[in-house]
Every structure is written in C-alpha cells, then in structure tokens.
Image (cartoon, rainbow, N blue to C red):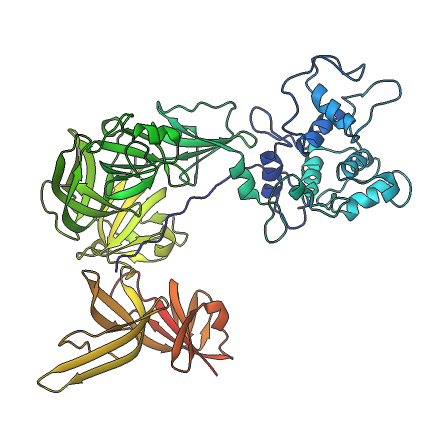
Amino acid sequence: MKRLIPLCLALVMALTCLAAVPAQGADLASVQGTVQALGIMTGDENGNMNLTASINRAEFAKMLVMASPYKDSVASGASNYSLFSDVRRGHWATEYIRVAVEQGWVTGYSDGTFRPDQTIKLEEAAASLLRLLGYENSDLVGSYPAAQINKFHALGLGDGITVTQGQLLTRGDCMYIFYNLMTAETKSGSVYATTLGYSLTASGELDYAGLVSSDLKGPFTAASGRLDLPFTPVSYTKNGHTASASDVSEYDIYYYNENTRAVYLYSNRVTGTYTAATPSTTSPTSVTVAGNSYTLGTSSAAYKMSSMGDFTVGDVVTLLIGMDGTVADVVAAEEVSSICYGVVTANGNESYVTAGGAIESGRTVEIFCTDGTTRTFTANATMRVGSIVSVSYSGGRTVVRSIGSKSTSGQVSRDGTKFGDLKFASDVQILDTDRDGNYAIIYPSRLAGYRLDSDDVRWYATNEDGEITYLILNNATGDIYTYGLLTNVTEVNTGTSITSSYSYVINGTAGVHAPSGTMYNVESGGARFIYSGGQIDGIRNLKRLSVDDITTTQLTADGQTYKISEQVQVYLRSGGSYNLTNLAAVGDTAAYDLVAYYDDLNVSAGGLVRVIVATPK
C-alpha cells in the first residue's frame, strides 16, 4: 500500500545559555529564548546576551516597558525632552524612562535626577515588578524592603536566582525574573501573560512556539541568494535544521524574528505545468501545478498566477513554498534549478484549457517524490511503474528520465547519522520502494542499527560534502506494506468451486474482502495485505507470538526479543469486537493477555511487531 508520513516543519532556535539554577518547569534555553522573543532582552551585535553584566536603572526601565502593554507605544529613537536633569535630550532611554515613571513602576530622586547608570538591587527590582502587577504597598505585609522581597518570592518571581537583599542584579538574574513575570499572578488574579494577549500551554507555561511564530516577519524571497534584514542574524535554520549564512540559496523563502535575531529558510519548490486556477484566473486563491492543488499564500503569488500577472495556464512554473505549505512566490521554471527524484506509480493522460481557449493534452506520469508528494508531469513516453526517475526542467518543458542503479552497503549507525562510511545530510530524503510502485517515507532513525546490503539500495545521491541527500531502497524495511488484523476467515473449496470471505480491521477501520474464485489459505490474526490497483490482491499471515514482557519499543516472547514498529496497531479485544487503542493503555501483562504479530519477511530492516491484540484477563 502507498503510505505517506507527513513531513513536518519545526522551529529550531540556536541559543546560548547561562549556567544557573533553572526556573521551575523551564529549561535554560526556554528562559532565554522567551525573553528574547518578547523583546524584553536582546543581545549585542554578536548575539551575546552578556548575562553576567550588571543592570542599570535605564536598562531596567526599558525591560519594564517591553514587558508591559506599552511596548509598542514607545516612540522609536531618543526623545527631545526629559523629565530629569541627568537624562538629557537625546538619551537612548528617555522614552522608556518616561513611560515607566508615568505608570508609577519606578521613581526619580528628590534632587530631580533619575540616575540612569546606577545599578539595580534586588529590593528595587522587586518593588517595580510588584507595581507592574498592580500591587500597592497596602497589599503587602510588613515594611520595605522585606515586604516587597517576600511577596516577590511568593509570586515565583525569584525562581532561578540566588540574589538576596542588598545585592545587585545581573542581566542573567533579570532574564529569569522577567521570564517568571509572565506566569506570575496579578493583583486581580490573572496570569500576567494573558493580560498582554499571550497564550499559555496546558502546563501553564508561556506558549513559546506560538510566541516566536507571532513575531515572525515574512515570507520574503531571496531572489539573488541574499537576505534583506534589519539586523545581523545570530542563528539560521533551513527546512527545520540548524544552518548557517552559507546555506542561503537563490530563491529560498525566508522569515525572521527580529527579537531573537533568528532566520528561518525554506527551499521547498514545485516545478510543473500550470493547468488550473480556483475559483478563476481573474482572482485565484489556489492553482494546480504538476497535478496538485496549492494555496496561494501571498498577494504577490496570487497576482503572478492571475490573468493580469506573469503566468498563464499552460506555462511551466516553479512554485516557492513557504513554512505553512502555501505558495509564497512564483518564478519561471528556467530561473530555478529544480529537480525531483522518485518512483513511478502510474501513467495517464491529461488535458487542460489554455488562456487562449485551446485544449492541450498529452501523456503524463505520476511520481511519488522523495519529499513525500505525489506529482504528475508531462512525459514523452510511458514509464514503467516502479522505476526510479528524475524530473528536471529543460528547453521549456519538464523532462522525466529513468535513473540507473547506484548501490552501496554498510551498517547504519545506532544514532542514525551514518550509513557505512557516508553521513546522512541533515535534510536527507529516503524512500523504501518495490518494483510494483509501492513506497513508504523512511527516516534515518528507522534504519538505525541495521545493516543494508547492496541489494537493499536501488539508488542514492550525495552533496558536495559527500553526505547522502537522497536514498531509494529496495523493500529493505517492509514498511511499504499494509498491516492489519483478520477478525474472521471463511474459505471453502468444494473441488468445483471456491468461496472465501475475509473480515479485517486495518488501522481501526473494518472491512470485508470477498474475492471471486480465490482463497489465500490464511487464518484469523495479524496479516499483511497486498494491494494492486488500489484493491486487496493478496493476504499473508504474520508470525504469532505470545508476549511474556513488553515495553514501548520491544517485547519478549519465548525467550527472544522483538522490536515493535513505531506504527504498530494495538487492538483491545472485547467479545467479538476489536477496538483500536495504544500500547500505553494495554501494556500491563498482569491485566491483559497480549498476542503480537511480527513480519517474518526476509528484509534487512524488517522483523518488526506490526500488530498487538490485548484481551482482558
């Protein structure tokens, strides 16, 4: 069966951390990343947060404002007036000091000065933070400074710091204090972050991923391979992996977070014939390219694909896909070096109406590409289903070519980073396939610890660093098949006629297969289902095991250990019904009789438990 495990995008932050006592419920990277994403604290031009440096009153005033509802109302640049004699016109912190004083979070001195360069003590910071949360002196028990410090710690504002009364705060201390501020309780009983419009996770922490995403700017196109940024980046990721400035390529789509000075690059591209627009070419919201529909995610992309823009139906274009899977930009195919590798799954014909009203038609080939997408391309000839091909752009059209075999062998490292002497690239794409056009997306971790022989590898490619970027296997894992449970089997052979019926459950969905004049000589239990043309064409039993002991990754039966597939199907048997559940719910061998079924296929990375049935004792 053809199965696709969706590819996921993740935000990865490259952060440097101070070695200190962690705030409760948070790791150091989350603390620093959060205050950076909030804009409360930023590093120097090199991204250094200087966490051991002391903090002065001007800097602390800015932190208070940036952690408040007034963060976006402070005028940029220096002000032309000042409330204090020692904060002269043009001082960088004038506006922050003005807001902090007007809101009553900090005060000046009786001599008319603010003393912006004076360092901050714990009790001074505690008093300011409590005022920010709405507390007044009358709400506290005792006198200054003990009352302020006690309430400060009672609210959890001091988690992660070791400073005591009279001691000066460092930038590292402030990092923890302002992180803790977000989940502290205001005088009115609200979580402070929610009063600013931020979301919390189920555990009550600030939603860091949502916070970073909300402050992202983009998408932008690196048309010349250069980034137009208002800052010097301190971290890059590309397609969800740690990267560097040298990884920026022409026509990458990029986003940035100015607070964290992080850049996120994406190089997902689709090249093919533009065959349709929805709802119309006048004002399209989605387009069909290479047989798939793509949502237009920007007004620029929508304009380019409209009847007033750069491209018309029938053109071969390259879609530049952003982080949310929508089209961020569109360019002519000849401008971009775009190539797809994959396995042929079907041949067909396609027709479409051009902008001029002409009907164009031609032979097509359907290909499941290594990036996890099925695409349809025009082809000059019928391609053999199951063959490995490349798709490129040349002479104004897409070109589909068969790829000759290129094999290698070796042990995959236990951490899944190397195959023999070759490293896997961080964005390696792996397919397991067979000669009938079946396929499965495979991740390096799936192959960890297994040895692959030359017969297991159909083709691979490396980058300029000698790392494997594409790997297409020859049914090395058994993951290309569909597994499930036969719940009832009827097979009758009278000698003159054959009657058979097979009731099954696959991934929780029940069905009945009754082939005409065929029986598979199987029995109830775990099974492998063979498909042809989208229909069941064969069934084979899996090997049965009575489970003695089990964990989330392996089990023991008859003194032997068996690995459990990450996609294992677990069923709870109740009477004559089988309900899909998970291993955590039924993994107690004292409460359940467990029967497992594993594939005994002769494949290098097979032999996994695919189905487990739990029956209450």
Quadrant location of residue 581? bottom left
- Residue that lies at the very extreme toward the bottom in this rendered image: 494
Quadrant location of residue 296? top left
434 to the left or right of 443: left
Q: Which of 525 and 140 is in front in this view?
A: 140
For residue 528, above or below residue 376: below
Q: Position of residue 132 (x, y in %)?
A: 75, 36
Residue at 37% x, 28% y: name it. 300
Residue at 34% x, 31% y: name it. 302
Figure quadrant of the N terminus: bottom left
264 to the left or right of 59: left
Residue 14 seen in the figure: no
Q: Nearer the viewer, residue 531 or 535?
A: 535
Q: Position of residue 242 (x, y in %)?
A: 45, 38
Residue 494 seen in the figure: yes
Quadrant location of residue 139? top right
Q: How many labels does the image show?
A: 0
342 to the left or right of 233: left
For residue 250, above or below residue 569: above
426 to the left or right of 260: left
Q: Position of residue 374 (x, y in %)?
A: 26, 47
Q: Position of residue 78 (x, y in %)?
A: 67, 16
